[in-house]
Amino acid sequence: MSEHIYLLTLGLPLATLLVIFGMKYWSNAHKARAEAASAEAYRELASKSAAALADNAAAMATMQATLADMKGRLASVETMLKEVG
């Protein structure tokens, strides 16, 4: 009977330490996977934002060209009105 108690007093603290270190390892591995997924999501978001920025720049250039054309037309209409009036 005393041998069982002796083995339990040695085994339980060692098993507890093993479980604690196992949980710590699992926690660190889980955290690393979560950080990797977060970094990948951030990269994807950054690439989408860069694409949207390029699209916005193209749209802005188109708008500026249209506005310049309208400005030219307005100047010619003003010139015609000055000649008529």
Image: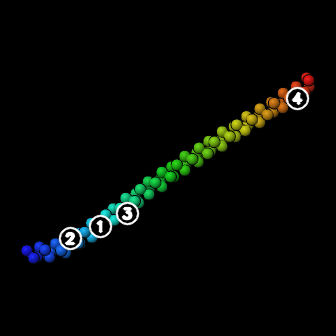
Q: Helix, strand or loop at disc 4?
A: helix
Mark 1 neighbour class, 10 Å CA radius: few under 14, some 14 to 19, many 20 or more: few
Marks 4 and 3, how far apart in space?
A: 75 Å
Seen in the picture, residue 16 relative to 65 is either above or below; the reply is below
The residue carrying mark 2 is 12
Residue situated in front as seen by the camera: 11 or 64: 11
The residue carrying mark 4 is 79
In the picture, residue 57 is in which quadrant?
top right
Mark 2 neighbour class, 10 Å CA radius: few under 14, some 14 to 19, many 20 or more: few
Q: Amino acid at mark 3?
A: Asn
Looking at the rendered image, the disc whose residue lies closer to the viewer, 3 or 1, is: 1
Q: Amino acid at mark 1?
A: Ile
Looking at the rendered image, the disc whose residue lies closer to the viewer, 3 or 2, is: 2
- Rendered residue at 73%/34% (across/down): 66
The residue carrying mark 3 is 28
Q: Position of residue 3 (x, y in %)?
A: 10, 76
The residue carrying mark 1 is 20
Marks 1 and 2, how far apart in space?
A: 12 Å
- Rendered residue at 80%/30% (across/down): 73
- Rendered residue at 77%/33% (across/down): 69
Q: Amino acid at mark 2?
A: Leu
Label 4–label 1 contact, CB within 8 A:
no
Marks 4 and 2, how far apart in space?
A: 98 Å
Q: Which mark sits nearer the N-terminus, 4 or 2?
A: 2
Q: Position of residue 41 (x, y in %)?
A: 48, 51
